[in-house]
Image: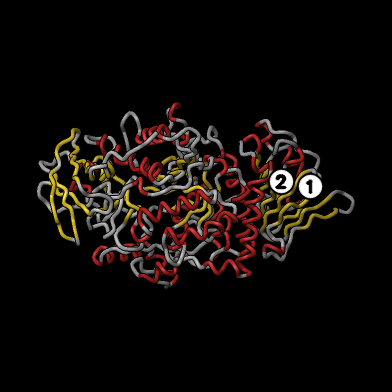
């Protein structure tokens, strides 16, 4: 279907049509600007439902405009497609039909084929623009990722921001290259066979440059609250137009920018008590607008572990394709670092809890959470395993640390390689964070570029948040407002040529290639997965404090395709192979109907401590003095054993 944005500024054969929602206004005018000054003003007329509309002849793309409500100062269009002079300046008319796309044959990437790479445009390259990312696309293709997930680009105050302070949801950030730059990036990505998923924020607006209340107080409600203040009004008087404003934004990215999916930020903060939840309306409307055969993946960040998000709307769910499942990150982080401050206090990092998380999708399924002070989660077993998005790093889990340190900054290389392999070998949907694949040396810190008054409050708030960290370490938390905080967070691409980074990159390439080609790893259903906790040493039977490992069994279409993935996150692992296989065979997971494991004709397919990955303590699969074979891991690592080859 042909879709057209019903609000904002639309180029017509005669000029430009302007349409805005301002239900309580007595009069609405659009001011046209030339050289920063108002040149003419045109009155809008009521169009029903609180909308105002007019058509101004003789103007077109590039015209600068702003709306005046009841004679007050002109303000940017809430549905502005471009803010070339910043979020406080006039909006600019954009003609969506002017860009010449070359991706007519592109259909997107199915969810189960996604290998997602999270990118912050401003720090991914020295230039920090959409166009600067285009020369990097062949690198991403060679790495094996299939989708770039772009952190929010709705325009924000200043020149540097994570994107979650956005105030112009429809306008790609001018500091990144604006609408034209983003379209060129998407088109070029499709030419490389890469999808683009866009992170969008529908639960709050930033604190500077948000003029929605000028147009209507009904955009927000004091009936519900979020960590960022009043919630968006999704279920009160006037909410129909607010919901339409947000849903039109999703359609705008899908149709005008050809993006292949959306990542919805903090959907637990989209509070809606109406009969049809906003998320259900969003997913149904979006999918019905797309051409047959087009793949469009909607993922959600949601702290509740609520399986309802992933159920089809026809079954009372919200129709989300995949949900960020942080339990995996938290369990593995604690397993390697022992950290248990903040929300980590809810997790043990034990192999048993890790195995349960991988097996089910998330750990919390209704248990009491001491951090949240209530029961958390629902049963996930009805969801498909690719409906859980797993990571060991993302913008939050790195950037919300006091110094923005990455996992590879705080654990040994052997442990980092092991956890990387575990992530890439489980059947859940995979998300990497920029630079993770080469163990980047640069941090990713929290940075802003607010006005001096607001910026001072942000700096003070950030340092107060980590006051205990300063007292303990005597290290000052970086100032988010300082330009050097932003500059230090930029990737250093020359690192991929340095030995200590090249080795890790080679591991990631091999693992992603295996994930995308091996028959057992291509099969993603629950019946093809079993996860066992086993003693790491033969001589520790009956010792409750014995070191343990995790053995993951992935089944293909035939017994010869089966893989055993031995995961050792600490200490040593030394087991009789035949005994190990017997333990896996007797696991309760076989109750799911899986095939019996074939005879243990096992060979090492991949070892994270292989020399070519930077390791020095490779695993040993040796003859056990005529009594079978032994598998020895003398350091943290992951070994992939191929059956029958």
Q: Residue at x 35, y 61 (%)?
A: 175
Above or below, comparing residue 5 to residue 63 in the picture: above
Left or right of residue 178: residue 545: right
How dense is the environment of label 2, judged by Cα within 10 Å: few (below 14), some, or many (20 and up)? many
Count how many numbered circles sit on residues in the image.
Answer: 2
Residue 511 picture location, percent across and down: 64, 53
Q: Nearer the viewer, residue 278 or 1?
A: 1
Above or below, comparing residue 143 to residue 325 in the picture: below
Disc assigned to residue 564: 2
Q: Which residue is mark 1?
A: 602
Q: CA distance from mark 1 to mark 2?
A: 9 Å
Disc assigned to residue 66: none
Above or below, comparing residue 525 to residue 183 in the picture: above
Left or right of residue 45: residue 372: right
Residue 85 visible in the shown view? yes
Residue 345 visible in the shown view? no
Q: Do residues under tags 1 and 2 come within 8 Å of each other at their CB atoms? A: yes
Looking at this view, name the residue that lies furthest to the right.
Answer: 626
Q: Residue at x 59, y 56 (%)?
A: 143
Residue 51 picture location, percent across and down: 19, 38
Looking at this view, name the residue that lies furthest to the top.
Answer: 314
Residue 215 figure quarter:
top left
Q: Secondary structure at mark 2?
A: strand
Whichever of labels 1 and 2 marks the residue nearer the N terminus, that label is 2
Q: Nearer the viewer, residue 571 or 489?
A: 489
Residue 554 picture location, percent across and down: 68, 42
């Amino acid at each position: 279907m042909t879709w057209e944005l019903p609000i904002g500024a639309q180029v017509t054969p005669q000029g430009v049509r302007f349409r805005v929602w301002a239900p309580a206004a007595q009069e609405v005018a659009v001011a046209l600007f030339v050289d920063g000054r108002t040149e003419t003003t045109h009155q809008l007329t009521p169009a029903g439902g609180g909308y105002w509309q007019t058509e101004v002849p003789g103007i077109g793309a590039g015209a600068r405009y702003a709306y005046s409500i009841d004679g007050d100062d002109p303000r940017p269009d809430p549905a502005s497609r471009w803010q070339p002079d910043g979020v406080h300046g006039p909006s600019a008319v954009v003609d969506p039909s002017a860009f010449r796309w070359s991706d007519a044959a592109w259909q997107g990437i199915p969810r189960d084929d996604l290998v997602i790479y999270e990118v912050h445009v401003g720090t991914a390259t020295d230039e920090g623009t959409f166009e600067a990312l285009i020369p990097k696309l062949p690198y991403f293709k060679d790495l094996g990722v299939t989708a770039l997930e772009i952190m929010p680009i709705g325009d924000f105050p200043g020149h540097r921001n994570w994107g979650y302070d956005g105030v112009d949801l429809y306008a790609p950030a001018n500091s990144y290259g604006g609408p034209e730059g983003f379209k060129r990036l998407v088109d070029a990505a499709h030419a490389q066979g890469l999808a683009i998923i866009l992170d969008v924020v529908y639960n709050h607006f930033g604190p500077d440059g948000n003029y929605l209340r000028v147009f209507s107080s009904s955009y927000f409600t004091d009936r519900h609250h979020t960590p960022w203040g009043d919630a968006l009004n999704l279920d009160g008087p006037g909410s129909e137009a607010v919901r339409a404003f947000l849903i039109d934004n999703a359609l705008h990215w899908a149709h005008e920018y050809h993006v292949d999916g959306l990542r919805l930020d903090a959907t637990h903060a989209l509070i809606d008590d109406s009969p049809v939840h906003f998320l259900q309306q969003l997913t149904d409307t979006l999918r019905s607008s797309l051409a047959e055969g087009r793949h469009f993946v909607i993922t959600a960040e949601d702290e509740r572990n609520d399986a309802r998000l992933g159920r089809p709307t026809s079954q009372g769910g919200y129709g989300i394709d995949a949900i960020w499942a942080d339990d995996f990150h938290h369990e593995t982080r604690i397993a390697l670092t022992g950290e248990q401050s903040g929300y980590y206090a809810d997790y043990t990092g034990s192999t048993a809890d890790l195995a349960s998380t991988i097996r089910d999708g998330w750990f919390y399924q209704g248990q009491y959470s001491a951090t949240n002070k209530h029961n958390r989660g629902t049963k996930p077993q009805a969801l498909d395993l690719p409906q859980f998005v797993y990571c060991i790093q993302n913008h939050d889990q790195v950037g919300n640390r006091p110094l923005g340190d990455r996992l590879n900054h705080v654990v040994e290389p052997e442990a980092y390689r092991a956890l990387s392999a575990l992530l890439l070998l489980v059947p859940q949907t995979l998300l990497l964070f920029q630079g993770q694949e080469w163990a980047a040396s640069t941090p990713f810190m929290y940075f802003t570029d607010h006005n001096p008054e607001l910026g001072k409050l942000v700096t003070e708030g950030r340092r107060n948040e980590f006051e205990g960290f300063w007292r303990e370490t005597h290290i000052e938390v970086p100032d988010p407002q300082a330009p050097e905080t932003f500059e230090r967070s930029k990737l250093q691409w020359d690192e991929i040529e340095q030995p200590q980074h090249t080795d890790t990159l080679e591991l990631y390439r091999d693992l992603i290639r295996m994930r995308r080609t091996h028959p057992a790893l291509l099969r993603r259903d629950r019946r093809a997965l079993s996860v066992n906790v086993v003693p790491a040493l033969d001589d520790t039977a009956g010792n409750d404090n014995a070191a343990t490992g995790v053995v993951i069994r992935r089944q293909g279409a035939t017994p010869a395709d089966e893989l055993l993935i031995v995961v050792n996150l600490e200490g040593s692992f030394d087991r009789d192979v035949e005994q190990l296989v017997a333990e896996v065979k007797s696991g309760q997971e076989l109750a799911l109907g899986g095939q019996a494991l074939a005879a243990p004709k096992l060979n090492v397919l991949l070892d994270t401590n292989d020399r070519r990955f930077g390791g020095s303590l490779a695993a040993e699969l040796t003859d056990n003095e005529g009594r079978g074979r032994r598998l020895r891991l003398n350091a943290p690592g992951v070994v992939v054993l191929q059956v029958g080859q």
